[in-house]
Amino acid sequence: MSKTLYKRTDYSLSSLIERIDMGEIGLPDIQRPFVWEAAKVRDLFDSMYRGFPAGYLLFWENAHSNNSRQIGSNSKPKIPLLLIVDGQQRLTSLYAVLKGRPVLTKDFKEITIQIAFRPTDFTFAVADAAVQKDPEFIPNISVLWSSSTSIFRLVNSYLDRLKKARDVSEEEIQTIQEAISDLKNLESYQFTTMEIASNVNEEQVSEIFVRINSKGVTLKQADFILTLLSVHWDEGRTQLEKFCRECRVPSSSSAPSPFNYFIHPDPDQILRVSVGLAFKRARLQYVYSILRGKDLETGEFSEERRLVQFDELKAAQAKTLDLTNWHEFQKALMQAGFLSSNMITSDIGLLYTYIMFLLGKYEFKLKSNQLRDVIARWFFMTAITGRYTSSAETVMESDLARLRSVNNAQEFINSLDTVIKDTLTDDYWNITLVNALETSSARTPVLFAYFAALNLLNANALFSKLKVSQLLDPAIKSKKSGVERHHLFPKAYLKKLGITEVRQTNQIANYALVEWSDNIYKKL
């Protein structure tokens, strides 16, 4: 029989909360975006109250403990012994309710999860305005586990409030007392955990997760790395999340901001840029091991190696999140003719190009004008060909490997230009591109490359005195799109010629950009 990769352990809810507070269980910061709906938290408490199973928790023993920091509720530099692989949302829910701690929504708005309880019939509810006014409910069960709460006083207070609204029988009083006591005793509810050994690699952990997770969700390499950041460099993960949050919302002051019209990235996406810059790796499968201090050849872990690797990541992340770099890169996109996310078909392609930008600046010391020119050319090529839309990691890994023999700025430029020339050949322009135009898809790389070309040529929209670039300005928000697509050869005319297939009549080669008012007029 093969060696078991995990051990089974049972914990009471109170011991789990205590171990999180002590930092022995590395529950990521409670102020991270919480993706569960309040109704799901309510259902969790209802299941536990009724004695139903609440699912397994999956932990992973921390391979390293030196210089780690606690990410529970206290600030003590306690070393997490266990990392959470599965069950983070359940534990966050339970911790937030039992401790009365606020959480952040996906929109980064702070809320308090308030679950109400009706002792007379053991009903749980999300505490809305109506429930809070209803004397039948305890409006927020968090008070039961507060150190300042006396259960005796809480029961009496609840009964006094209920009696003011209606008559309460002795039988009901006994039911209420027992129900509230049972709710309080949920802190003794037993959770079964599977603790995976520290020497198990991340691929095996991911497979274990998939095999026991009924939803069949696959863990991504970025999930592992973000977990490591939470444990060993929580400040770095907080920086990533702050940057991504501010990318979405315009600054309310004159202060610099990463807000932009091209991409609203997630932390794991920006993490890819930092990893690419620091380690020149596109595949994340090795990065987790590197950041754990693992020697990929010997398989041995080294705390010293881990610290060195984290220092490299920290330096790369500082450059990645630098607002000057971020906005100078976007100028290169604009120089390529692209103005907003409406013209971008691949976020990962954009971010991989950002890696190239940063490498050009820091590794090969390109001047600003040189860097912007070559990155604009590179992005246009990657965009029009959809270079990073299939097997993106493999393609980028090859692009980064090509740079290992590059030693200076001119060689960097020559390397990228060689790929551009080898990709955008005469056959591409005369055959591949022409065939790619034979599609009715509303979002295709060649269509947006055409829009970009119109922007670069300073072209007017058809029948209009306004430039295409003006009508595609992402800062203009209107009920009507600035430009619409208009058939050059009307469908009725094509039908007379026997051309009726949508793929032909609506192919992008049969469209021109016009203002919406002109489009309506022409249709009339």
Image (tube, rainbow, N blue to C red):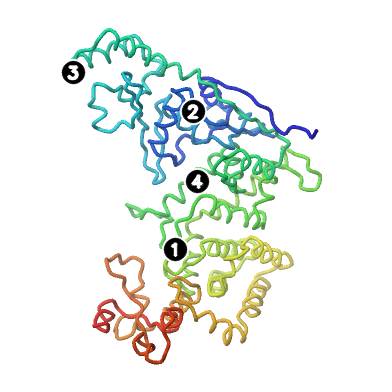
* CB contact under 8 Å: marks 3 and 2: no
Quadrant of the rendered image containing residue 379: bottom right
Lower position in the chain sequence, tag 1 or tag 4: 4
Task: State the residue at coordinates (60%, 80%).
Answer: 424
- Camera-near label (2 vs 4) is 2
Mark 1 closeness class: few <14, some 14–19, many ≥20 residues within 10 Å: many
Tell me the SS state at disc 1: loop
**In the foreground, 101 or 166:** 166
Disc 3 from disc 4: Cα separation: 51 Å
Identify the amino acid type marked 2: Ser
* CB contact under 8 Å: marks 2 and 4: no
Lower position in the chain sequence, tag 2 or tag 4: 2
Tell me if 175 is positioned left or right of 242 in this view: left
Residue tagged 2: 73
Instruction: Work out which residue is located at the far top of the displayed protein and give it.
Output: 170
Residue 458, image x and y in percent? 39, 82
Q: Which mark is residue 239?
A: 4
Residue tagged 3: 165
- Please tell me whether residue 223 is drawn above or below residue 488 in the rendered image: above
* CB contact under 8 Å: marks 3 and 1: no
- Please tell me whether residue 123 is drawn above or below residue 255 in the rendered image: above
Disc 3 from disc 2: Cα separation: 39 Å
Residue tagged 1: 262
Residue 134, image x and y in percent? 23, 25
Tell me if 205 is positioned left or right of 36 in this view: right
Disc 1 from disc 4: Cα separation: 20 Å
Disc 2 from disc 4: Cα separation: 19 Å
